[in-house]
Image (tube, rainbow, N blue to C red):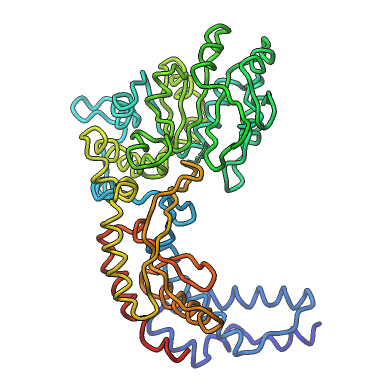
Amino acid sequence: MTSELRHLPSVDRVVSDERLKRLEDTYPRTLLVDVVRQHLERQRRSIAAGQPCPSMDNIVESVRAQVYALFTSSLRPVINATGVILHTNLGRAPLSKEATAAMAAVASGYCNLEMEVDSRARGTRQAHVELGLCQLTGAEAALAVNNNASALLLALAALAKKREVIVSRGQAVEIGGGFRIPDVMRQSGARLVEVGTANYTYVSDYEQAITPRTAALMRVHASNFKLIGFTQQVSLAELVALGRRYGLPVLDDLGSGCLLDTTAYGLDPEPMLQESVAAGAGLVFASGDKLLGGPQAGVVVGSKELVDRLKNHSLARVVRIDKARLAGLAATLIHYLKGEAISKIPVWRMISAPLAEIDRRARSWAEAGGELASVIDGETMVGGGSLPGAVLPTKLVAIGQAGKKGKNATQLVNQRLVSGEFPIIGRVSGNMLLLDPRSVLPEDDRIVLEALSRIGTGLESV
Ligand SMILES: *Cc1c(COP(=O)(O)O)cnc(C)c1O
């Protein structure tokens, strides 16, 4: 073991290797020395743990890779041609130009986040979105926080700590990414009381579970699955009526934050925030970056009395929203208020894009892609915990060919498309790489066309 350690070169020796010396033209020497020192320290520990000593070449390569990685931002834009509009792994909702500009404007300087400029009085950051949220949903009061998960945590802690919240068993679900309603409940200090069975729950199930310890009734929108077949869930109106009889508020976790009627675009009805408010829910919860089409945020609307309890709870500070996202959310709400959401908010532009227009774009993509590309019928998913199973008709560009050769070609095309300055992410199905223009904004077509026109060359010889 000690003899292995003796083979490990000194910091000086590694730093003066020709290949690393060249890096000094571009990167600060002190940083190079630091990276080398830390790398050798890790090697020393792994040798002590029984690993063999790495070669000099290996050490130089690792240090070089580490230095490059340090100076390249690993977070960067990609083109989402997957056909999933709200793709959580790709950052969910893209923002409108106005929302992006509003975020940039407050990010680069100071802003009146919590100050009423005229009077110099202390203001509240919520004032910048509360009015709009109330106007759009008909609610008395509103609050924006970090995300919907934290909004739920805050509400349960503020309203139901050490008390009970009744939820249908069919709604005590995992929403994705390990986010489970029962876990949030436990974290908040509230006790989850599940009623009914996985597929059937009746008003009487809720009623029988009400005790003096009950703090609220809760509904969770089944945002990533669909119960089909023989099922029974209690409607929000029925829950509200039951809650009124016992003096209990109803908490309605909608998730997707829809403000527009999805049936106008051939989709199933997605519950809307304003409907829940009108039905009498005490608090309604939504994400800012799903169908609302704004930045990551948790949006809560409801009665003033309940919203105030959330605002005044100590966790409100823990989950508060930052100035940039607040500005993006406010600008997004303005699109709805002006009646221009469909034409300005990217997720709604994608949802409402006519099939004929998608077809035209798909054809131009396929033409650029050359012989191996063709246009086929397909489906776009709305995704992101909204409209479970809801799909929109689309036209896909399919690139590839049948057989084993086809598989290699698809792999090569895929590699080329993701290796550019703007990686283009499609989905692979069988031998084909599928690209969906519906989840790409038309202003990004230029990037896609350029990339596609480059991939054609050399594929014949695969
Ligand atoms: C997405 C979702 C959440 C979590 O929202 P985040 O903003 O991602 O924290 C909670 N509840 C429902 C019903 C959802 O769909």
Q: Nearer the viewer, residue 258 or 128?
A: 258
Which of the image's four quarters has the N terminus? bottom right
Q: How many marks?
A: 0
Q: Nearer the viewer, residue 119 or 339?
A: 339
Residue at 76%, 79% (x, y): give it.
51
Residue 400 lies, in percent from the top left, at 45, 76
**199 sits to left or right of 123:** right
| Residue 6 figure quarter | bottom right
Residue 117 visible from this viewpoint: yes
Residue at 52%, 39% (x, y): give it.
223
Residue 420 lies, in percent from the top left, at 38, 75
Q: Nearer the viewer, residue 315 or 338?
A: 338
Residue at 37%, 72% (x, y): give it.
374
On screen, residue 207 above or below 271 = above
Residue 41 lies, in percent from the top left, at 65, 74
**221 sits to left or right of 93:** right
Residue at 43%, 28% (x, y): give it.
300
Residue 434 lies, in percent from the top left, at 44, 67
On screen, residue 30 above or below 435 = below
On screen, residue 70 above or below 145 = below
